[in-house]
Amino acid sequence: MKYLDEYRDGDAARALIAAIERTASKPWVIMEVCGGQTHAIVKYGLDRLLGDSVELVHGPGCPVCVTPLEMIDRAHHIASQPDVVFCSFGDMLRVPGSDGDLLGLKATGADVRVVYSPLDTLAIAQANPDKRVVFFAIGFETTAPANAMAVSLAAKRGVRNLSFLVSHVLVPPVMSSILQAPDNRVQAFLGPGHVCAVMGIREYEPLAERYRVPIVVTGFEPIDLLEGILRSVQRLEQDQPGVEIRYGRAVRQCGNPASQALIGDVFDVCDRKWRGVGTIPKSGLKLSYPYAAFDAERVFDDSTAIVTEEPDVCISGLVLRGLKKPNQCPAFGTRCTPDTPLGATMVSGEGACAAYMAYGRMEMAQ
Amino acid sequence: MNDRELEAAVVRKVGESRAAAEEFFAKRGAEVVAMARAMASAFDNGARLFVMGNGGSACDALHMAVEFSHPIVEKRPALPATALCADPIMITAIGNDLDFSMVFARQIEREGRAGDIAVGISTSGQSANVLRGLRAARDAGMLTIGLAGRDGGRMVDACDHILIVPSFSIHRIQETHEQLLHILWDLIHVIRGEEDVL
């Protein structure tokens, strides 16, 4: 398949790995930001093939994984109300809250629906005028334009029974948070390809300069990732921090200005709590004032306190910051499995723990 | 830390501050001049200056307004300047009735006219109320000026002229902004024909 097979070519991959091993004069620690990149790395065994020259650590680029428990519980609270149709992408349905998940709530009779696009909720709301329809709008900058479009269209069409429970997060602030941490080991990043397709690379340049790290924006196929790793190692060896695009078929320096304008109109930047990481200033998006009527947190504002409790044994926070690997968790593969997940990194299709389980890293946990 | 270490820290921090400012002005001198010329031209045409910011940047906004409206050099004319963060009555009324993100935009919509100048100050470049204020200013046909930090955030697209201090330290950004507002005031008067006395 054109534009796919060549990026999965085994000979090309082996040549790149050999080049990486020749170039690295010492072990380097590189973090891939996106959950999709983590899955490709684990699926194709790239981390094992690289040997000692590069240690790949997994980043927090799984929006499902970093959605705070309070937000999950708030979603459950809203979804459990009798006049509500609660819509979400499928992967959020199995993320455990303090008391079960949305799928379990659906089984008790709540109207919880999977949608494939936030725009689908417009039709649902218009078809159910006596219901309050809510869309769970999570994600990084990648999904923000589509969610912004849905909000904008809802406003233009006067769809008043639709609201959005927003929990968007931004990549550059969490990268900054990781780099500032006293226990940080990350020396370079494989930058988020699809986030940069939307936002461009401007926000990453001050990070690279301030913390003197290479940030190589890559895609999600094995050749993309290995090219990104090679360039990262070359830059590290030459002490050459900076941002570089190695995913030119999708990413331009300026990103997508139309998407950025729409995001800028519909969303304001806010502080955001990240599950397993804590609150990071100016790291999230919330609906801006002109769209306040579509903000589910205002529509369903009540004084019910959301008290959350994370399972003690779950180390997803350490996994998200690249400090631990999934199979270093005492519950990995035993108490915590895809069928009985304790934390979001096992539930989400983009989570590192789910990747390790899916691609046969079980033996390392024994 | 003992006293000697603390004294060394003082010297180090002052050095960092000086280095950040020197690097900024060395690289951005032409942009500072361009910004000053645009503002001078606006003042020549009867512009009023409106400045906005939050927290420490609100202090800078107040400072900028008083520099322009009550000049320290006797011979230099006072120029009309208002800090939009100076009136707690308006801030609390708009913040309470609408949203805190609208506290500057609403004032701009009421007071601003085409040809006036709006200056937004934000160390992150992401402050929602500053951004909305700048957008309201642009919609009103005002000259939009930004003083920001880090990568300039969303202010880059909202300003006709923007100066970004590329630092992650709020203190270093604010210190450079403080020098910048003094230099801008001075350059504007020199461009408008005043003697370069400072």
Image: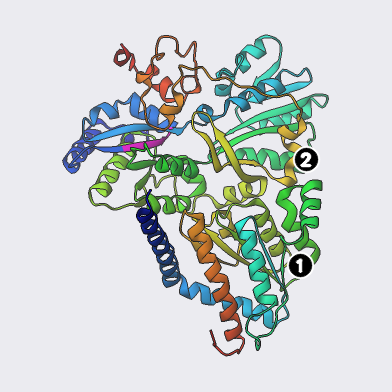
Residue A226, how many percent across, how many down? Answer: 29, 37
Give the residue at the far front of this rendering.
Answer: B3
Residue A127, how many percent across, how many down? Answer: 78, 26
Q: Which mark is residue B112?
A: 1
Q: Which residue is mark 2?
A: A157
Q: Amino acid at mark 1?
A: Gly
Evaluate whether residue B103 shows in this view.
yes
**Colour pattern:** rainbow
Report in which chain the residue with disc 2 lies: A
Image quadrant holding the N terminus of chain A, namely top left
Q: Kindly state the secondary structure of the residue where label 1 is placed.
A: loop
Tell me: B122 left or right of A253: right
Q: Kindly state the secondary structure of the residue where label 2 is placed.
A: helix
Question: CB atoms at circles 1 and 2 under 8 Å apart?
Answer: no
- Residue A277 is inside the magenta segment: no
- Range shown magenta: A30-34
Report in which chain the residue with disc 1 lies: B
Residue B160, how many percent across, how many down? Answer: 60, 67
Q: Indicate whether A164 appears above or below A366.
A: below
